[in-house]
Amino acid sequence: MRAPFLLLLILTCLLSNQASAQGRTEPIVEVEFKEEETIPGQYLTLRVTVLVPTWMPEPVAFPPLDVPNLRIRQPERSTSPTSRTIDGESWSGVSRRYLVSPMVPGEFSIPVQKLQVTYADPQTSEPVKVELAVDPVTLRGIVPKGAESLDPFIAANGLSLSHKISENLLELKPGDSITRTITAKITGASPIILPHLTEVPAIGGFAAYRDDPVVEEHDERGVVSGTRSEKLTLMVQGNGSGILPALHIDWYDIDGKKVQTATLDPVEISATGASVSASNRLADWVLKNVIGLCTLMLLLGLTGFLAWPYLRRHLRDRQARKLAGKNYALKLLLEAIRQKDLSTTIHTLDDWAGRSPVTPAVDLERIERALLPITSARYGLGGPQERSEDWQAVSRIVRKMQSGHLREASAMTLPALNP
């Protein structure tokens, strides 16, 4: 009696597994987050993979990730096609990589996110839209031992300070100026974590002006680096002297595992070429002209107030005409092609073609044929990989069509005046 019972049990399990395998047709969302803690300013890799049993006629609508005190960005080529064998069947999909960095110490959570997937039904090949949940993830920003006192906390592989300053710093005269540009270069972290580099000093005889900071970030094979530059200009107005202060930035060296200090020496400046009479003449000139300047500003302000409604209506109408024009649609289309954004390219292509003058169907079909290799590479199964040359070919066709070089087949010509 035991042998038939065991045979029946084994047969039941096999049938159950086969039915389960045949019934698995819903898309799969996988979240890969191997490391859960890092130093603030350093990045962890979060990967979200979507798999379907057939193919995807439309791109996956990934959710925007925005969490306070977390910097989440997509590196270059963050989205790529993928495939996998599941229960003996080949599934296709898309994988997207995010870089996640805590900006301050503490524990953070990326809550459950929703994404939309469009895939072909295994039975009918008709497109099916589904909304899937992306599992939440948690991470921690930790401060290394010995770096608890850093404020702000900066962790990097390297940090250096340099400056460019005018050659003449002493015995300046009214009308002369000094410029000092301080640059902080950081490797292994984003320059956005760097503090202000300059303060506007109060030095007698000088008027100081600070430009807005210039921050440049670079990403080379996943390694983040960049610079922050700040420019200070000092105009000589009279006699005086002072010190442009030194600069010290404490930071944690990830490679050396210790706190380092980047420094910049102070700079002495002076102006001794202004006479008392010259200063008085300048003050008299300012006093004589201030009333006239205030009157002029008042008149300009009144004129602007009265003319603003008409000017605003004119600008609004002009902007509306621009946005509705075919040239503006062409600009959006070429930008989408340059960004290699297939979804936006398809959408803006239809918009551009439909605007006056309407693009002939034969030209539109030519563009769509040029997009076929890109569509097959991105959403097809087992096809060739996407190439930059295909995008460049699409851009050339669109530009030539807009300029009228490919209109021979569909151009409308006027009849002769004297047939």
Image (tube, helix red, strand yellow):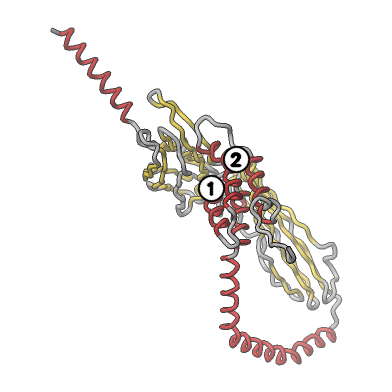
Quadrant containing the N terminus in the rendered view: top left
Residue 127 horizontal/vertical position (percent): 40, 42
Q: Residue furthest front?
A: 419
- Residue in view at x 57 percent, y 56 percent: 353
Give the vertical position of 400 relative to 24 (above or below).
below
Q: What residue type is labelled 1?
A: Arg
Q: Earlier in the sequence, mark 1 or mark 2?
A: 1
Q: Is 147 on the left-hand or right-hand side of 247?
A: left
Residue placed under numbered mark 2 in the picture: 222
Q: What element carries label 1?
A: strand
Name the kind of residue labelled 2 in the image. Gly
Q: Is residue 386 left or right of residue 121?
A: right
Q: Nearer the viewer, residue 278 or 124?
A: 124
Secondary structure of the residue carrying tag 2 is loop
Residue shown at 32% from the left, 27% from the top: 22
x, y percentage for residue 46? 48, 40
Q: How many labels does the image show?
A: 2
Relative image position of residue 166 (x, y in whole percent): 81, 63
Q: Is residue 256 visible to the viewer in this orientation of the structure?
A: no
Reading the image, the residue beneath label 1 is 73
Report, in whole angstroms, how far the alpha carbon at label 1 lies from the one at label 2. 11 Å
C-beta proximity under 8 Å, tags 1 and 2: no
- Which quadrant would residue 131 be assigned to in this image? top left
